[in-house]
Image (tube, coloured by chain):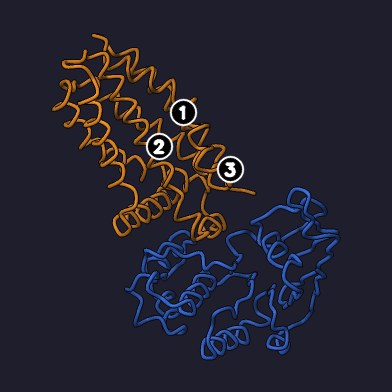
Amino acid sequence: MRYFRDVGALARKDLLLELRARDTLPAMVLFVAAVFVVFHFALPESPSRLETVGLLWVAILFTALLGLGRAFVPEREQRTLDGLVLAPCDRSAIWLAKSLATFAFLAAAEVVALPLYAIFFHRVGGATIAAVVLADIGICAVGTFLGAMAVATRARDLLLPLLFLPLAIPIVVGAVGASVVDSPGRYLGFLALYDALFAVVCWASFEYVVAE
Amino acid sequence: MLVARRLGKRFGEKRVLRGIDLDLATGGFLVVTGPNGSGKTTLLRICAGLAQPTEGTIERAVSRGAIGYLGHEPLVYRELTALENLELYGRLYRIAERRERIGMLLERFGLWEVRHERVASYSRGMTQRLALCRVLLHDPELLVLDEPYNALDEAGAELLDAQLAELRGERTFLLATHEPARLAPFASGRLALAA
């Protein structure tokens, strides 16, 4: 119970910081909207559903990357990770809280992105929405973990995409599959398995990421 | 409280600390001095558990939750208010009667009136006072303070003096400073690092 109180306090802090600074969410929303507008004019008239689903997932992935890149910026700029790391709470609470906050920002961006996608390209079905939720969990779990690793390095802006994108390939495979097939159960199950596996790995190893 | 033997630290090819022996008994007050680049901050970070030595050993008879660490940065969020920052740390440190303790510290360090203002609007001295509130919030057994007088005006420095005098003997201190004379009345030992 205490663990979840710590997670709640830390996640609340991240949401409050975003509410005040507005550094991340507006950038994510503008980026994903701009991508759809650009592709609306760049793609041939009446592109196939298969083509635009791929575009949707590329846009979601890079929008997420934008948010993940900023996830640990307050901790880096104000060195507050030292303060959090010294607190007597389980250090994985920092990862879980940051993942939840990033999930909230990504979900908020998608609330704008999915209707825009529907306006410009094709209707968004229930399977796609389920895939978005499951993919977001995996993206935020893995991305936050890698963001914490990258933030300690000088080449953090380069390192995060280099580490994250290969690990996100299974998410893209599962999400695109779930969005285009008639029976998306297997693909959604694959995404859920990915989420569970990587969430456990990230949760268990975050302690070593923040320790020097 | 703290015992270190032949402590050393390298950052790549650069050696920052070499062969440091340190004994800090419970209730002790050790002042670390040395010129810029002598490794004071690195030593304090190792003692606080924020960095690992590359050579030697260190033993701490204190859990990480009982350490109060003040670094060069105040370790507070600039977009949060003083109250929100201390509330966050208070929750993470599971402080009983958190509100009362926060109120008492903010009063003592002269920040009560500005407790609802964002830290970004504070002067450097006010931020340092808030950092001291954060360090003292959980009533730590071991206080590791790196240049605690930094940015404090005379009134702030006197407040810190009073706090050190009150806790001297009851708590264990490890301080790095460029003003050893100011800490001479409190110090039980001194460790001078060479460049």
Residue A30 vs A168, above or below: the answer is below
Question: Which kind of residue does numbered mark 1 sit on?
Answer: Leu
Crowdedness near tag 2: few (<14), some (14–19) or many (≥20) residues, C-alpha within 10 Å: many
The nearer-to-camera label among 3 and 1 is 1
Residue at horizontal 20%, vertical 15%?
Answer: A47
Q: Give residue A209's mark.
A: 3
**Residue ID at (52%, 55%):** A81
A173 horizontally vs A162: left or right: left
- What is the spatial separation of the Cα atoms under label 2 and label 1, in whole angstroms? 9 Å
Q: Which residue is mark 1?
A: A165
Disc 2, disc 1: CB below 8 Å? yes
Query: Is label 3 on the same chain as label 1?
Result: yes
Neighbourhood count class around disc 1 (C-alpha, 10 Å): few under 14, some 14–19, many 20 upward: some
As drawn, is B51 to the left or to the right of B95? right
Number of the label disc, if any, that sits on residue A65: 2
Outermost residue, left side: A119
Give the percent coordinates (x, y) of residue A43: 23, 20
Residue B98 % position (x, y): 42, 69
Q: Secondary structure at mark 2?
A: helix
Label 2 in the same subunit as label 1: yes
